[in-house]
Each structure stands twice: as structure tokens, then as C-alpha cells.
Image: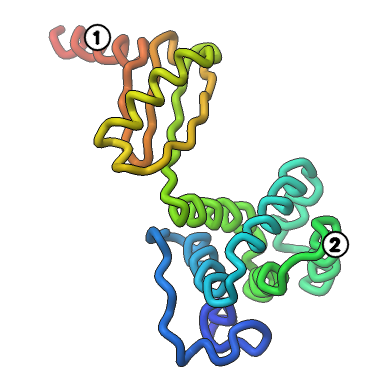
Amino acid sequence: MASRFTRLSTAAPKLARGYAAASSPKAPITLFGLDGRYATALYTAAVRQNALEAVERDLSSLQSLISKDKAVQAFLENPTVPRQVKVEGINALLNKAGKVSPLTKNLFEVLNENSRLDQTVKVLSAYAELMSAHRNELPLTITSVKELDKATLNKITDALQKSKLADGKKLLVKNKVKADILGGILVEIGDKSIDLTVSSKVAKLNKLITDSV
């Protein structure tokens, strides 16, 4: 029996009736894994219904609710909870998020029907990644021992924005604090990284010493 996952991307009774004959919209980036498949199917369905931003607001709200409630996280990830009980739990969660799009509701129904609710958080993050790519944005994470002051952060960001690494995209900057890098910074831009940390230099020195013994 075919997976009902296709309800999000083909001629589904609830949301996509008539879509099969239409050309499928193309996602801005290719995502892999189960979470990538569900997020991409949701994205293409949202494009057809002109509901990209509405779904994004729903998922952002739901992501916030889930991240703040360990009980909800455990509920979604527990495979022993009967499906009907999960239906009731999902409805309660969606009600907390307010009036959600039918596409958002259908996503959760399909995840439940396919016993994939444990993928919920990953799917929400994957959709956010698709929307960021849709807006021509590129994530930039700068890791440092302590929080960087605004002037330093802006200087690094401006330099990277003008570089080929940015590829003409708008950088979404996040400063991550991690004490074990000892010093320096780690720059992660898209799928590329520049390691200028002290811990990296120490590791290279240790390897050099070990190899020379």
C-alpha cells in the first residue's frame, strides 16, 4: 500500500485535488532524508496554494510551543502512544497555535498516519531552511569563546557579505558561544566553514608533535 505521504504532493483528497495534472513547483534547494521529503512536499503544496508565509507562521509558532514543552516533545516521539490518542494530542497542540492552515493540519495528520511524528521537529526546521533559501538567505554562524560585541560582529559580517562565500545572498547572522574552542572564531557560512579557533591550532600542533615522534 502506497504511503499516504503523497497526500502533500499529489492529488490528495483533502488538499491537493487536481494538483497531479499541474507542473510541480521546484523547491529552492534539495533536502535529503525523511524530514527533507516531508518539508519539500509541504513547500510545493504551499506554493500551489500561495500559502508559503501562512504555513511558515504556523510552523514557527508550533516549533516554539514544542521546544518549550518537554512533555509535548516526549509525546510526539513516543511510538507506543496509540494513533487515536495522538490525533487528540495533535488537535490540542494545533489549537494552542491558533487557527492554522489546512496544509499545516494535513502535515500533522500525514505524519501521524505514517508513524513519523518523531520527525516533527526536524520537518519544521527543514521547512524553515526551505523558506530561508526561498528568500535568498544564507545562514552565518560565528562561534566564539564569549559573545562578540556588535561592532566586531558587524565587521566580520560585512567582510563576508562582500566575499564570494556569500554568493550574493543575504547573510542571517548568529553568534554562538562555545568555551571549549579556547579562543579565536569558527565561521560557518552555508555548507562551508573557516576554522580560526585556538583549539584547532592546538590540535594541529599536537598532531605534528605526535607524527614527529
Q: Can residue 179 be seen in this view?
A: no
Secondary structure at badge 2 equals helix
In the picture, the quarter occupied by the C terminus is top left
Q: What residue sits 43% from the left and 74% below the top?
A: 25
Q: In this view, does 202 lie to the left or right of 90?
A: left
Q: Is residue 64 left or right of residue 182?
A: right
Of pointers 1 and 2, the one earlier in the residue sequence: 2
* Place of residue 110 in the rendered image (x, y in percent of width and height, measured from the top left): 65, 74
Which residue is label 2 attached to?
A: 95
Q: Is residue 168 above or below residue 105?
A: above
Q: What residue sits 60% from the left and 90% below the top?
A: 17
Q: What residue sits 32% from the left and 17% below the top?
A: 196
What amino acid does circle 2 point to?
Answer: Asn
Which residue is label 1 attached to?
A: 205
Q: Is residue 79 above or below residue 176?
A: below
Q: In this view, does 118 lie to the left or right of 45?
A: right
| Label 1 crowd bin: few (<14), some (14–19), many (20+), radius 10 Å | few
